[in-house]
Amino acid sequence: MSIIIVSFNTADLLADCLQSVYDDPDSEHWQIIVADNASGDDSVAMVLERFPGVHVLALDRNYGFAAANNRGAEVACGDHLLFLNSDTVVPVGAIGELADYLEATPDAAIVGARLLSPDGSLQLSARSFPGPLNTFLLYSGLSRLLPGVRPFGAPYLSYIDHTQVNDVDYVDGACLMMRRATFDRLGGWCEDYFLYAEDADLCFRARQLGASVIYYGPRHITHVGGASAARVAVRSTLESHRSTFLFILRHRGRAAFWLTRLLTTLGVLPRLLATAIAYPFAALLGRADAMGSRVRLYRRVLALCLSRNVLPTGGLMR
């Protein structure tokens, strides 16, 4: 088993993640790799000092999530690869149970655990592939109004039993395990995605092989979520939209790509107008900064939808 952890400016969270991995008695049989995307904090120094058994790849710049995972896989020697976010905490036994399930299920290409927030609440990490329908459901609010009803809960599969085993479109890349042979057959993660949607792309290609992608609800890991991207929230949101557009263009076709851009524009525009109108009243209540941030965010997303180049640029957080 090789465990590959991509890090970027999350030294404290990375330390907690690595400690949770080493707390598992089976860790003596695992190869643990940290691919650090040129963090500006002491992430690399911390790993070298506190976890000398970890194989550290100190990359010379921020290559993004997919490319850093591929760099880690290049030095991995395990028959199974676990791609794990640096802001996760893994309970004892969880990794071994995922590996046992994968080994016992030949038609499963990828398996991911249930994700919980630090407060114990569920993160909806089993999802259906991006497309125009999901875009409409998300921006119309129907996915939030009727989350337990098909097809309204489709974007995050909120109608499934998240404590059970489910065959899904894709699982969140925060915890994603696969066989080395499958990874090599797929050619690894697609590095055209800098951040976001690379997990959907990987799972889509796996399902094209006729294999299944499994959401393994009986086991959970704790996931803070967005620890690196939170520092650049607007750019992170834009990169999420860019990656979604790329996925749809590649796997759904040009008609779906243009329809998704239109639906996103129609979804963002009323939000922008509503927040702009509400801004003076928010200022009176001392909430000008928060409302102003929302106005800027919606304006940037709208500008992206109307721009000539909406695909990933790789510029986020570099």
Image: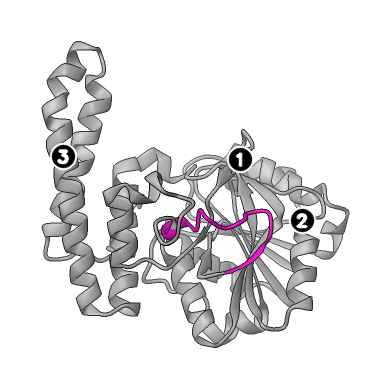
For the N terminus, the quadrant is bottom right
Looking at the rendered structure, the kind of residue marked 3 is Leu
Q: Which residues are magenta?
A: 154-167
Q: Nearer the viewer, residue 154 or 202?
A: 154
Disc with the residue nearer the chain's start (2 vs 3): 2
Horizontal side of 46 relative to 146 (left or right) equals right
Residue 272: mark: 3
Q: Nearer the viewer, residue 219 or 230?
A: 219
Residue 155: say if magenta: yes
Indicate the secondary structure of the residue bearing disc 1: helix
Give x and y (percent) for residue 282.
21, 19
Give x and y (percent) for residue 191.
41, 71
Graded by Cα atoms within 10 Å as few (under 14), some (14 to 19) or many (20 or more), the crowding at tag 1 reads: some
Looking at the rendered structure, the kind of residue marked 2 is Ala
According to the picture, the residue beneath numbered tag 1 turns out to be 13
According to the picture, the residue beneath numbered tag 2 turns out to be 94
Q: Residue at x 11, y 65 (%)?
A: 308
